[in-house]
Every structure is written in structure tokens, then in C-alpha cells.
């Protein structure tokens, strides 16, 4: 069996304008934070209530084998916007590195093709301030990590550097009821006016060094969606389409849910009420988005993509379904997440495909869908999956490489080679016949292991060349 090495170097250019394709659709990209493969109804969960996600999934194509480029969030976000493995940009883990201006982002490409562009929610690809203490890395004088959406192709943004509570995002309690399961790390119930609170410490920003201070009370997903929908309503009146990135915080810890959404799970424990309630609150806002698109008569002219950024956090009720591992793991449960695409009258409804796809495929796939011709001037790890979505192909030719700390993996249509300690310990799994990764067949398939190890090594050399600035 042959495995291909993909390190082709090509050049970005833009040769297609909106006038050449007058009906070019809007593009909306939604991403949740730490939502596991098994945390949605459309992937079989019988407890968590996600009616709007399930409805949208039925209107389009569900990706059964959709992978994030990393088992943590910052790197995955970088891959979504560039089509490249995040290690190439030196964004190896959360709260590390920043989006570089030398990178070409999907927002920049679409803006050059007459799209209005907006980012709403969690950014996590750099800091927003050099003047005050904010979130994990924002602080006075920290210019090195300052990198905001407007530097990377977004006309407007309403964004945070990192996580916030999923309800009343600017505050946290001074005291926690540990007996029922409240804690600073996991979360707490909706706060009352009589509760003693303090500032959480992560802020929203909408322009360079402009901190947002108003309308930040209540459900965080609703706060984000308020801003995104206002942008969509304004831009829908334009002749040009819009590109909107909505990166929600749910259900990243700390999870906070209001009484209404906790009551959906009143028969369960307090932690389950908080966690599942935050997912259902987020689901309500996805439904609100779709309702707005319908009211604006933009639903049939909008391509909507949905996924999570990695598997579920350890120690939470989140589910990776039948798969091994969770967040921070390169086993399936750490990087295989719920995902679908909807494009009414264009993409087959109520379809599930097993074609392997990754967040690095977003950029080449979307540009291909929009008939925006492009050539790649640097190594691109993603590939267009348009033909798979339309049923023309069923198997992926281009392998997918993953890196996280000392862990490495190389994934093909059928097999996963995973290295757990800088290449010394190798495991091989047949993902078509053993998706739960229970049977390590490395000793039985030594020739295949060596072949895949060689391909992985060559890819890592290319990635390291990018990381050290070779592409710029």
C-alpha cells in the first residue's frame, strides 16, 4: 500500500470576482468549545437536548469522521482559518503563539472577493490589549502576542481572548457551594443579585484596545449571537455576501446555566444540569441564527458549517461517544468531533458520510465550493472535500498529520499510526474495523508501520521548516 507525501508548495492568487458568480452564497462557520462527538442528538445522544442542531444536521450532510487539527482549541482555530497544521504557525497548544500576519486566512481571501467579514466569540489566537490585564496573556506591554481579528481579514469583531463563564460572562462568585458541586474550575449556578461577585477577568473587545462594557449580562451564547445577528442583518441588505465566524464558548469550563436550562435536566445531578444546560442554551442560539436567516430569506443562500474544536474536557459529563480518549488525546475521542454542513438546494439533505475530514480542510473546501481559484504558495495540510460531500469520491487520498506535545499521529483512510513518546512507542489501529482503537496491530503489520512512520517523519520535517519561518 502506498502513502503519499503532501508538501507541495504553491502560490495564493485570486482570479474570481463576485461579478463572475452573482449568486455566491454567504458562509457561516460555527464552532463550539469542548463539545464531544457524543454530545449531540444527531450523533445519538439520548440525554442532551439539541433540537436545533439536530434539525440543521438533517438539512445537510453530517461528517461521521470529522477531525480537529489538534486536541486543544487554539491550534484547531488556527487550522480553520489557514488550511494549515497549527504547528506550522508555531501555535502548538492553547495560550501559546498567535496568528501571524504572514499567514493567509480564509477571511482575507473572502474579503478580497467582496465578502463582508465578521468574527464573534472566542478568538484564542492572540491577545487584545497591551494596556491592561486581560484573560490568560493580555497585559501591559505585551506586544509580541497581540494579534486581533481585524489584522487577519475581519472587518468587524466582538471577541474574547479565551474562555469566559457561559452565563454572565464578566463575573464569578466570591463563594461557591461545594456541597452541590460548584467550583471555580467546573462552574456554578446562575448568580442572583444578592450574591457576592467579582470580575472574572476575561473581557470582550470590538476594536483595537476597545473593551466592550455594555450588554454583557445573561447567557453568553446569546450575547455573542446578538452581535453576530446584528452584523448579518446589516450586511444582508448589501449586494455582497457575508462571511461570519461564530466561535461559542459552550461547553468549556466554567459552565454556568440559568434555571430554565437546568430544569431541562432536573432529574439529573447538579453538574449534569450545568453542563447539559449550557449545551442546550447554545443550541437555542443556533436555532435563533437559523430563524433569522429564514426571516431574511438568506437560509437558502447560506452555507453553514458546524463543528467543535476538540473532544470533551476530562472530568466533565461530556461524551466522546464510543471513542477512546478525550481532550488532549490524539486517540479518536480527543480529535473526532460532531460536524455537519448545510446548504439548502445544493447539498444532499439527511446524509451522513464516513469520508475523513479535518478542520484544515475548511479553507480549501470552502474556496472550492465558491469557485474561487487559488494556488498555494506554501504547504497546505488540508484538501478540498467538495467531491466527497457531493458523493463523487468516498476515500481520502491525502493523509492527515497530528501533533500535540510529544504525541504524533498519521491518519489515512483506514489506518492510524500513533506515536506517544517522540516516536519510540508506536501503535497502529485499523479505524475502519476498530474505530474504538482497542486492538493495536503494530506488531502484526510491521511493514505498514515503517511505511507510515516514514511518511510521518517527512511531514514533520516540512512542518518544522514552516515553524521556523521557512514559508515566509
Image: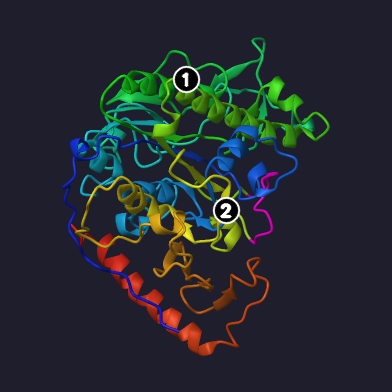
Q: Could you tell me residue 421's position as x and y percent?
A: 51, 72
User: In whole angstroms, how far apart are the C-alphas of marks 2 and 1?
Assistant: 28 Å
Q: Which residue is mark 2?
A: 352
Give the image quarter of residue 304: top left
Answer yes or no: do the residues labelled 2 and 1 have beta carbons within 8 Å? no
Q: In the rendered image of this protein, does residue 288 appear above or below residue 382?
A: above
Q: Could you tell me residue 145's position as x and y percent?
A: 30, 41
Q: Which residues are magenta?
A: 314-324
Q: Which residue is mark 1?
A: 295
Give the image quarter of residue 271: top right
Placement of the N terminus among the 4 image quadrants: bottom left
Q: Could you tell me residue 119's position as x and y percent?
A: 36, 32
In the image as oriented, which residue stretches furthest toward the front?
345
Q: Nearer the viewer, residue 56 or 321?
A: 56
Horizontal side of residue 152 vs 256, given as left or right: left
Residue at (48% x, 54% y) in the render:
68
Q: Main secondary structure of the magenta part?
A: loop
Q: Secondary structure at mark 2?
A: strand
**Label 2 CA crowd tier, 10 Å (few <14, some 14–19, many 20+):** some
Q: Could you tell me residue 54's position as x and y percent?
A: 62, 39
Amino acid at each position: 500500500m502506498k502513502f503519499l507525501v503532501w508538501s507541495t508548495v504553491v502560490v495564493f492568487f485570486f482570479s474570481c470576482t463576485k461579478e463572475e458568480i452573482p449568486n455566491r452564497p454567504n458562509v457561516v462557520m460555527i464552532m463550539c468549545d469542548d463539545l464531544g462527538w457524543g454530545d449531540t442528538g444527531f450523533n445519538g445522544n439520548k440525554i442532551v437536548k439539541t433540537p436545533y442542531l439536530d434539525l440543521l444536521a438533517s438539512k445537510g450532510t453530517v461528517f461521521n469522521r470529522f477531525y480537529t487539527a489538534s486536541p486543544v482549541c487554539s491550534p484547531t482555530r488556527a487550522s480553520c482559518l489557514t488550511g494549515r497544521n497549527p504547528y506550522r504557525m508555531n501555535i502548538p497548544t492553547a495560550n501559546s503563539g498567535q496568528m501571524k500576519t504572514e499567514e493567509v486566512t480564509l477571511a482575507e481571501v473572502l474579503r478580497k472577493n467582496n465578502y463582508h467579514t465578521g468574527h464573534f466569540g472566542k478568538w484564542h489566537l492572540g491577545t487584545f490589549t497591551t494596556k491592561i490585564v486581560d484573560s490568560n496573556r493580555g497585559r501591559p506591554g505585551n506586544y509580541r502576542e497581540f494579534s486581533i481579528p481585524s489584522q487577519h481579514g475581519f472587518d468587524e469583531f466582538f471577541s474574547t481572548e479565551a474562555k469566559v463563564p457561559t452565563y454572565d460572562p464578566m463575573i464569578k462568585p466570591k463563594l461557591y457551594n461545594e456541597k452541590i458541586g460548584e467550583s471555580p474550575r467546573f462552574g456554578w449556578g446562575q448568580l442572583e443579585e444578592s450574591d457576592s461577585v467579582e470580575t472574572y477577568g476575561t473581557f470582550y473587545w470590538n476594536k483595537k484596545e476597545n473593551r466592550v462594557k455594555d450588554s454583557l449580562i445573561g447567557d453568553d451564547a446569546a450575547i455573542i449571537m446578538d452581535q453576530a445577528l446584528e452584523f448579518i442583518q446589516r450586511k444582508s441588505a448589501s449586494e455582497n455576501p457575508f462571511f461570519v465566524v461564530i466561535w461559542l464558548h459552550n461547553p468549556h469550563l466554567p459552565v454556568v446555566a440559568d434555571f430554565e436550562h437546568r430544569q431541562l435536566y432536573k432529574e439529573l445531578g447538579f453538574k449534569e444540569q450545568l453542563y447539559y444546560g449550557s449545551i442546550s442554551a447554545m443550541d437555542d442560539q443556533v436555532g435563533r441564527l437559523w430563524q433569522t436567516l429564514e426571516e431574511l430569506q438568506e437560509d437558502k443562500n447560506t452555507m453553514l458549517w458546524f463543528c467543535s474544536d476538540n473532544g470533551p474536557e476530562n472530568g466533565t459529563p461530556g461524551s466522546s461517544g464510543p471513542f477512546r480518549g478525550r481532550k488532549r488525546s490524539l486517540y479518536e475521542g480527543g480529535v473526532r468531533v460532531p460536524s455537519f454542513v448545510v446548504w439548502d438546494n445544493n447539498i444532499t439533505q439527511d446524509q451522513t458520510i464516513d469520508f475523513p475530514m479535518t478542520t484544515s480542510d475548511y479553507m480549501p473546501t470552502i474556496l472550492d465550493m465558491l469557485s474561487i481559484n487559488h494556488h498555494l504558495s506554501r504547504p497546505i495540510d488540508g484538501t478540498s472535500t467538495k467531491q466527497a460531500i457531493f458523493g463523487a469520491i468516498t476515500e481520502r487520498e491525502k493523509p492527515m498529520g497530528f501533533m500535540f506535545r510529544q504525541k504524533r499521529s498519521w491518519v489515512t483512510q483506514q489506518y492510524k499510526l500513533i506515536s506517544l513518546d517522540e516516536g519510540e512507542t508506536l501503535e497502529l489501529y485499523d479505524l475502519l474495523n476498530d474505530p474504538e482503537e482497542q486492538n493495536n496491530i503494530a506488531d502484526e503489520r510491521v511493514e505498514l508501520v515503517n511505511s507510515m512512520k516514514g511518511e510521518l517523519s517527512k511531514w514533520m520535517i516540512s512542518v518544522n521548516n514552516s515553524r521556523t519561518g521557512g514559508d515566509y
